[in-house]
Image (spheres, rainbow, N blue to C red):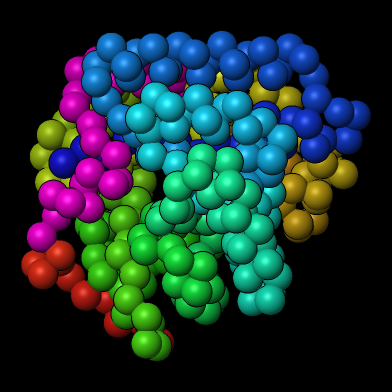
């Protein structure tokens, strides 16, 4: 089973940047979205789009366009603040506002959630309670390997699982991993999708019963990236914007950007995908692993 997902936040983040939105960036996102929607419609593929609440408020026509094209709308926080940078109270407010904005925008219940930057880890398990309190039935935030900012290597599974935490149960769609010897790494989205050659990604997907891709439009833009200013880095990552930290981020965001949109187009042309809503109906949840967290 191949699942196609996107995280949709770029327009609203661009509008919120100091100095305001650059019209050429907004036009670029519009153009990329149009290209993807046309391709998906031609292939009869529906994706899951994790969207921020702010997108629903400031660019409701984009969220409705996605929904009108049959794509599933799910939640990607209110304004892309990482869960591990929020207190439980702040995340409760953030999630409530985001779910509310998205539901009002499309007139449909929101069932899924993905934390910005996969920021639910063993250190903030309370996040699952907050999701359940806000009517979320499944999560796709677990990155079950080591990662620069967090990751959840002790999770133990990279296939759909049922999480039990306190008295709640939530379905989890973790990021699938590629095993190279004892090294486990993501391969099907973000910088990893840019890093690995197409045939390695395709071969890994062919071998797997479960593959979930994940993309931000910004991951797919081919223009050269710039070193972030200290101010912008600290505002976004909420950690010290030293030259080393900024340079590491620059290298990561620059790797392989040259052909990543073309690579994704090829992947969509050559593979069938479903969204999480459809996948959830195909999975036998009595057979999936149960992960008890405490
Ligand atoms: Zn995001």
Q: Is residue 276 magenta?
A: yes
Q: Residue at x 77, y 15 (%)?
A: 23
Q: Residue furthest front?
A: 107
Between 63 and 191, which is closer to the camera in this rendering?
63
Quarter containing the C terminus: bottom left
Was residue 252 drawn as part of the magenta stretch in this picture?
A: no
Is residue 103 toward the left or the right of residue 195 in the image? Answer: right
Residue at figure coordinates x 45%, y 66% from the top left = 135
Query: Relative to the observer, which residue lies in front, 45 or 268?
Result: 45
267 or 63, nearer to the observer: 63
Classify 137 as above or below 258.
below
Q: Tell me which corner region of the image, top left, top right, bottom left or bottom right, holds residue 259.
A: top left
Q: Name the spot of residue 42 as percent of width and height, x first.
A: 28, 12
Give me the residue at 51% from left, 68% from top: 134
Viewer-proximal residue among 248 and 288: 288
Q: Position of residue 255 (x, y in %)?
A: 52, 27
Q: Is residue 230 visible?
A: yes
The rendered magenta stretch, by its main secondary structure, is classed as: helix
Based on the displayed image, in which of its 4 quarters is residue 274 positioned? top left
In percent of width and height, residue 196 lies at 35, 30
| Number of dots carrying numbers | 0
* Residue 148 vertical placement versus 287 (above, below): above
Tell me where residue 174 appears, x and y as whole percent: 33, 56
Q: Which residues are magenta?
A: 256-284
């Amino acid at each position: 089973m191949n699942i196609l997902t996107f995280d949709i936040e770029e327009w609203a983040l661009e509008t919120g940047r100091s100095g305001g939105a650059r019209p050429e960036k907004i036009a670029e996102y519009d153009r990329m979205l149009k290209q993807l929607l046309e391709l998906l419609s031609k292939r009869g593929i529906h994706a899951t789009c994790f969207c921020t609440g702010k997108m629903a408020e400031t660019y409701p026509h984009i969220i409705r366009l996605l929904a009108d094209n049959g794509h599933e709308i799910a939640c990607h926080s209110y304004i892309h603040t990482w869960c591990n940078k929020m207190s439980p109270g702040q995340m409760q407010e953030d999630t409530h506002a985001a779910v509310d904005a998205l539901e009002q925008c499309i007139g449909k219940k929101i069932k899924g959630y993905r934390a910005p930057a996969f920021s639910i880890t063993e250190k903030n398990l309370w996040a699952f309670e907050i999701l359940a309190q806000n009517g979320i039935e499944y999560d796709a935030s677990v990155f079950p390997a080591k990662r620069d900012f967090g990751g959840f290597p002790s999770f133990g599974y990279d296939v759909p699982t049922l999480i039990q935490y306190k008295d709640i149960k939530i379905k989890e769609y973790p990021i699938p991993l590629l095993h190279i010897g004892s090294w486990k790494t993501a391969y099907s989205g973000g910088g990893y999708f840019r890093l690995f050659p197409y045939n390695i990604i395709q071969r890994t997907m062919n071998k797997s019963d479960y593959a979930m891709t994940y993309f931000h439009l910004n991951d797919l833009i081919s223009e050269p990236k710039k070193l972030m200013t200290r101010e912008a880095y600290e505002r976004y990552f909420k950690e010290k914007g030293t030259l080393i930290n900024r340079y590491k981020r620059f290298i990561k965001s620059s790797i392989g950007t040259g052909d990543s949109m073309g690579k994704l187009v090829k992947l969509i042309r050559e593979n069938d995908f479903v969204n999480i809503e459809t996948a959830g109906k195909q999975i036998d949840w009595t057979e999936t692993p149960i992960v008890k967290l405490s």
